[in-house]
Image (tube, rainbow, N blue to C red):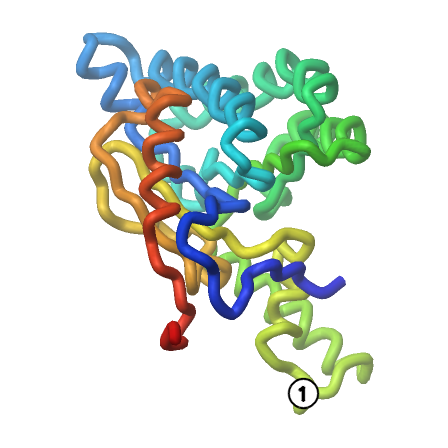
Amino acid sequence: MAAKDIRPDEEQPGAGPAHVAIIMDGNGRWATSRGRPRLVGHQHGARRVRDIVEACPRLGVEYLTIFAFSTENWKRTQVEVSGLMTLFKRYIKREAQRLLQSGVRVRFIGDRVRLDSALVQMMDNLEALTAGNSLVNLTIALNYGGRDEVTRATQRMAAEVAAGRLKAEDVDASTLASYLDTCMLPDPDLVIRTSGEARISNFLLWQSAYAEYEFIDTLWPDFTADCFADVLSGYGARDRRFGAVRA
């Protein structure tokens, strides 16, 4: 299936972003600054996700992609990793019906091979449960890395070429995009990273080629719906020409 791309050649100033991607950084620092275990920060961060998802319809955001766990996060302590995996299961169990009733469609991207089979089953079930929704498209990047995604996509393309189902000379940018985890999504218009760090951390490398970026100091557990609205209002003032010159 070809990647969906709703980005116009030019975007009129004042238009809000249809697809926002967020690197939800600062949970651990939020907790340690309060003398609490890092997992407490992740718990508060999970609750903040609900607020941001619920704000999307009134802010005109149709697609929200959040970075929940990267391929590099396995390097953290076993206690933190195990705690995060438990938190993901609790989030799915607690939020499933709310997401369904709120018109939210949930998708997961990333490599599921390393994830616990029970968690993968819960992810599959939540995707199936919410498949008929369309008010907000929530994509959760779990065991996701941009380089890993592109590597997996090229491996699948290479297998297709070897099998004679794809000609090497026919491979172009849109072909590669159709093999990515995000093939059913438009590219993000805006990428937000909280906590004051100014790097993209291997997140949506291919898809964010024309995205605007906002690096803000607020730690993720403190990133309220009002903060979200403020960032989006700044986006509307930008002149996005995608390499063209506006007449």
Three-letter amino acid code at disc 1?
Ala
Res 12 visible: yes
Q: In the image, residue 188 lies at what x, y percent?
A: 50, 52
- Residue 181: image quadrant is bottom right
Q: Is residue 246 left or right of residue 82?
A: left
- Residue 54: image quadrant is top right
User: According to the image, label 1 marks what residue?
Assistant: 168
- Residue 142: image quadrant is top right
**Label 1: element kind:** helix
Q: In the image, residue 57 lies at what x, y percent?
A: 58, 29
Quadrant of the frame with the C terminus: bottom left
Quadrant of the frame with the N terminus: bottom right
Identify the residue at the far bottom of this view. 169
Picture mark count = 1
- Foreground residue among 237 and 209: 237
Q: In the image, residue 59 lies at what x, y percent?
A: 50, 31
